């Protein structure tokens, strides 16, 4: 009996041993009788084979041992990127230390102490050592700690880190991604510069590191360590670490899981925070020129481990743990940000009954939820619209009634005024008629008076003559 399968190897199926024949590519089934106990053993055997792959011995050379070399060659061709965030007060020596770390001059201009707000300035440089290319981004906090009110001084730093995580997440969520050529701007390490006061951490330092420890790898460094004595410096280190632990600030710990670097990393963890001195000036000490700071009382050599921890910082940051810092940024800090953002968007790995959920199921559930929410909001908006329309109609009707009442009132007043005017007009016309009549009578009387003046004069003359005689 022959059956066709899409996998190779041998497999127990319903008590039958399936064997692959090389000539036909078919499995020949040798059916044997099994008891219920044997079936249970076969099921356990299947589960074990599924959980753990079998180890086989090859009889000759294959060639996949060159995979590490292929990976190295591809990485060298692609190049590397590393992003450093420098947090510290203006003038504490951030730019000088970065120049000294990478043995070059990044030509960063001096910053003023009078900025009203904290702003972050990122500059990217291309460096090459032998055949390895490094795209280095230096992010400087301009104006940090210079304001009178320092309450929100750390917030722009948190926003900048989150913005870089969000940019990478949006690139990941694209349908057509280009992560191979994408410039990763996520901050891989934060060098936090602490003033060499010799006393304790400032409140601003504690608040800032507490806000950043879940978002970036923090390596605290004591800047300008040549400002205090060795005894004071050692006490200051102990005091700083005690305050960080008591306040729950998680700083970056050099990994000890790799046997090749476990011993040195464990030793370097005991030297945190590093007390550093930076300088690009060269001073002649003996027969050679060394990077140092010249003082009237002597010379502080930057690369002398008896003078400062600069060499320890460079070895741990660049030579030994640069890749681990990049890996921790991606697997720990970015994954935490990504998980929180996706959970805010409603995506989950398990359902209400702790059953695994696929992305499609989560999407469909969220889609239905959004659809229901939209329907509910639409219904609420419709009801609100109807209510507002009714209220507006009632207001308009009330205004219409008021206008109608006002119109009727004005109409009545107009009618009454019209009647009064008509009455006045009638009276005036009667007065005019009476006046016309009087005028006509007066004119007639005047005419009669003008017609009889001669006869009266004659009578008067006759009367006078009779009296004279």
Image: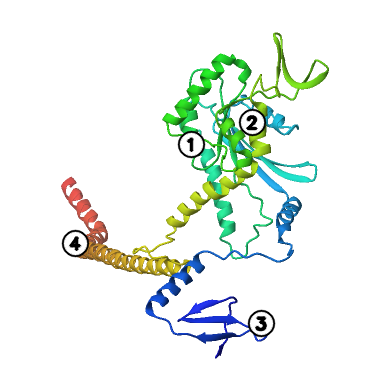
Q: Which residue is mark 3?
A: 22
Q: What is the spatial separation of the Cα atoms under label 2 and label 4, in whole angstroms?
A: 108 Å
Nearer the camera: disc 1 or disc 4: 1
As helix, strand or loop, the secondary structure at mark 4 comes to helix
Outermost residue, right direction?
287
Image coords of residue 366 (percent x, y): 41, 66
Q: What is the spatial separation of the Cα atoms under label 1 and label 4, in whole angstroms?
A: 97 Å
Classify the position of the N terminus by image quarter.
bottom right
Nearer the camera: disc 2 or disc 4: 2
Nearer the camera: disc 3 or disc 4: 3
Q: Which residue is mark 4?
A: 420
**Mark 3 vs mark 4: which is more N-terminal?**
3
**Mark 1 vs mark 2: which is more N-terminal?**
1
Q: As rendered, which of 122 and 403 lies closer to the eye?
A: 122
**Mark 4 residue crowding within 10 angstroms, few (<14) / some (14–19) / many (20+):** few
Up/down of 114 relative to 140, above or below: above
Circle 3/circle 4 CB separation < 8 Å: no
**Mark 2 residue crowding within 10 angstroms, few (<14) / some (14–19) / many (20+):** many
Using the rendered image of the protein, determine whether residue 421 is visible from the camera's viewpoint. Answer: no
As helix, strand or loop, the secondary structure at mark 2 comes to helix
Q: What is the spatial separation of the Cα atoms under label 1 and label 3, in whole angstroms?
A: 59 Å
Q: As rendered, which of 162 and 282 lies closer to the eye?
A: 282
Image coords of residue 153 (percent x, y): 50, 33
Residue at 65% across, 60% down: 178
Q: Which residue is mark 2?
A: 313
Circle 1/circle 2 CB separation < 8 Å: no
Q: Which residue is mark 1?
A: 250
Up/down of 142 relative to 397, above or below: above
**Mark 2 vs mark 4: which is more N-terminal?**
2
Up/down of 278 relative to 67, above or below: above
């Amino acid at each position: 009996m022959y059956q066709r399968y899409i996998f190779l190897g041998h497999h127990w199926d319903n008590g039958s041993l399936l064997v692959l024949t090389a000539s036909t590519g078919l499995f020949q089934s040798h059916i044997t009788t099994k008891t219920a106990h044997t079936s249970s053993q076969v099921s356990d055997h299947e589960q074990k084979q599924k959980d753990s792959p079998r180890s086989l011995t090859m009889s000759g050379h294959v060639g996949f041992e060159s995979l590490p070399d292929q990976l190295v060659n591809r990485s060298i061709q692609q190049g590397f990127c590393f992003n450093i965030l420098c947090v510290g007060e203006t003038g504490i020596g951030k730019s000088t230390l970065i120049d000294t770390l990478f043995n070059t001059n990044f030509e960063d201009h001096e910053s003023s102490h009078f900025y009203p707000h904290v702003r972050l300035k990122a500059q990217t440089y291309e460096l090459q050592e032998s055949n390895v290319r490094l795209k280095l981004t230096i992010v400087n906090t301009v104006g940090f700690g210079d304001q009178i009110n320092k309450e929100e001084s750390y917030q722009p730093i948190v926003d900048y880190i989150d913005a870089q995580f969000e940019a990478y997440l949006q690139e990941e969520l694209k349908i057509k991604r280009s992560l191979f050529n994408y410039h990763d701007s996520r901050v891989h390490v934060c060098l936090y510069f602490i003033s060499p006061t010799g006393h304790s951490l400032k409140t601003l330092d504690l608040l800032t590191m507490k806000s950043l420890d879940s978002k970036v790898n923090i390596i605290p460094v004591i800047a300008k360590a040549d400002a205090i004595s060795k005894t004071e410096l050692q006490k200051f280190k102990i005091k700083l670490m005690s305050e960080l632990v008591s306040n729950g600030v998680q700083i970056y710990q050099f990994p000890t899981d790799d046997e090749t670097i476990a011993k040195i990393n464990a030793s370097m963890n005991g030297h945190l925070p590093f007390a550093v001195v930076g300088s690009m000036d060269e001073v002649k000490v003996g027969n050679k020129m060394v990077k140092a700071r010249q003082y009237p009382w002597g010379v502080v050599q930057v690369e002398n481990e008896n003078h400062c921890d600069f060499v320890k910082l460079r070895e741990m940051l660049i030579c030994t743990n640069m890749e681990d810092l990049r890996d921790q940024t991606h697997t720990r800090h970015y994954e935490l940000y990504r998980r929180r953002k996706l959970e805010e968007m409603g995506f989950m790995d398990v359902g209400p009954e702790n059953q695994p959920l696929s992305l499609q199921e989560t999407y469909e559930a969220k889609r239905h939820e959004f659809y229901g929410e939209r329907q509910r909001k639409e219904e609420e908006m419709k009801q609100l619209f109807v209510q507002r329309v009714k209220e507006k109609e009632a207001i308009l009707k009330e205004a219409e009634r008021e206008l109608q009442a006002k119109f009727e009132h004005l109409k009545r007043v107009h009618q009454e005024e019209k009647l009064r005017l008509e009455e006045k007009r009638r009276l005036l016309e009667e007065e005019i008629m009476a006046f016309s009549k009087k005028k006509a009578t007066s004119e007639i009387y005047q005419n009669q008076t003008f017609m009889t003046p001669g006869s009266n004069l004659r009578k008067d003359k006759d009367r006078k003559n009779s009296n004279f005689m």
